Amino acid sequence: MKKAYLVLQNGRIFEGIPFGAEGDVTAELVFTTGMTGYIETLTDPSYHGQIVLQTFPLVGNYGIIPDDFESPAPKLSAYIVREPCDEPSNFRSEGTLDDYLKHMGVVGLYGVDTRALTKIIREYGTMNASVLSQLPDSIAAYTKDLAARALSGDVYAVSCRKPFAASEEGTPHIVLWDFGFKGSIAGKLAARGCKVTVVPAASTPADILAQKPDGILLSNGPGDPSVYTDIIKNLRELPSSNIPVFGICLGHQLLALAKGARSIKLKYGHHGANQPVRDTKTGKLYITSQNHEYSIDPKTLPEGAVMSYENVNDGTCEGISYSDIPAFSVQFHPEASAGPQDTEFLFDQFLTMVGGKRNAAQ
């Protein structure tokens, strides 16, 4: 049987069996703990520039379902599972995981000890890795170079190129600033009767205001938020418009940086559908879906900003409320997809804020 190899920057090598597309890939290795939702994981643009490891051992058992896609095509670099299912059982399925990865050009690897891999990442942190069809002559030289590489996702590689309507009719009108948005976010707004216009990551404040929005939603996306200095600059100018803003995941981080906070990289990030968060005001707990490597340092929050949610596991910042601008943001995904729907009410909270501004202006 044909073999392939996962080489970690710390020199560890895992032998596996290739599936999906053929090829060699180098990227940042992360793990996700979702027991279901592999379709949404595969098509989530936030995984751009990453090799994704599924901790749940069996993946592909309900096939590939296009209606559940979060974007038209996968953006991750490679996909690692313990065991792929070749005979899915689901009336909605339109193919196997292997066939889908082949069709979309995504390199896969299975038969790997995913439990051992996850423990390594938890102990040493997120690291660079390569999926290789053949091992290099010198592992020491290869891993030294691998460890020195600065690898990250890129918002501009996953954002739309020009504005488009995700929902053409409705009120209020929400502009979704696309840093790599999940389709379910637009879907939650459309289900609430909103007109939704998606605009590119490179949009200026003038571009966004020209859409005449009632509210602005800052989407999720990949990578280190601090490197997107142009977006942060544009965001810094936008609040003067007094239009309500809601940030999700990367959008949450970018808004905080625009207000003067700083971001930090977590040891191995939060990826999965079982992250507990606490409302700092009420003490109420929620289980949330998350996918990020970076977090906002709550010690650096500026005046007028307070941490509204915190992660129960590690105390990191999971949400910010602003008193000087009509805005709030969360690190987790209220649309879930896949995951618990505990915090879907945040879309209603945002639209209540939008409605209050609209009524005040009339």
Image (spheres, rainbow, N blue to C red):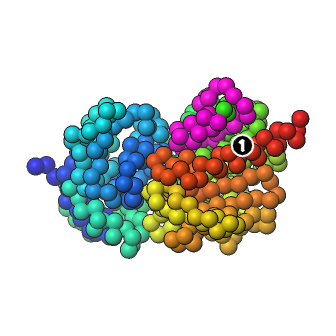
Residue 190 percent across, percent down from the top left: 62, 34
Residue 16 percent across, percent down from the top left: 20, 56
* Mark 1 lies on residue: 351
Residue at point 69% right, 70% down?
Answer: 300
Instruction: Looking at the picture, tell me which residue is in the foreground, 220 or 311.
Output: 311
Q: Residues within 10 Å of mark 1 (few under 14, many from 20)?
A: many
| Relative horizontal placement of residue 261, taking residue 1 as reference (left or right) | right
Q: Is residue 291 magenta?
A: no
Residue 287 shows in this picture: yes
What span is in magenta?
A: 164-192
**The C terminus sits in image quarter:** top right
Residue at point 76% right, 37% down?
Answer: 214
Residue 317 shows in this picture: no
Which three-letter amino acid code belongs to the residue tagged 1?
Leu
Dot 1 falls on a residue whose secondary structure is helix
Residue at point 33% right, 59% down?
Answer: 55
Instruction: Looking at the picture, tell me which residue is in the foreground, 71 or 14.
Output: 71
Instruction: Looking at the picture, tell me which residue is in the foreground, 346 or 250.
Output: 346
Residue 319 percent across, percent down from the top left: 64, 60
Asked if 178 appears above or below 129 in the picture, the reply is above
Looking at the rendered structure, the number of numbered marks drawn on it comes to: 1
Q: Is residue 190 magenta?
A: yes
Question: Which image quadrant for residue 156?
Answer: top right
| Relative horizontal placement of residue 252, taking residue 4 as reference (left or right) | right
Asked if 194 appears above or below 309 in the picture, the reply is above
Residue 328 percent across, percent down from the top left: 71, 54
Residue at point 43% right, 37% down?
Answer: 68
Residue located farthest toward the top when viewing the structure as drawn: 169
| Relative horizontal placement of residue 147, taking residue 315 as reference (left or right) | left
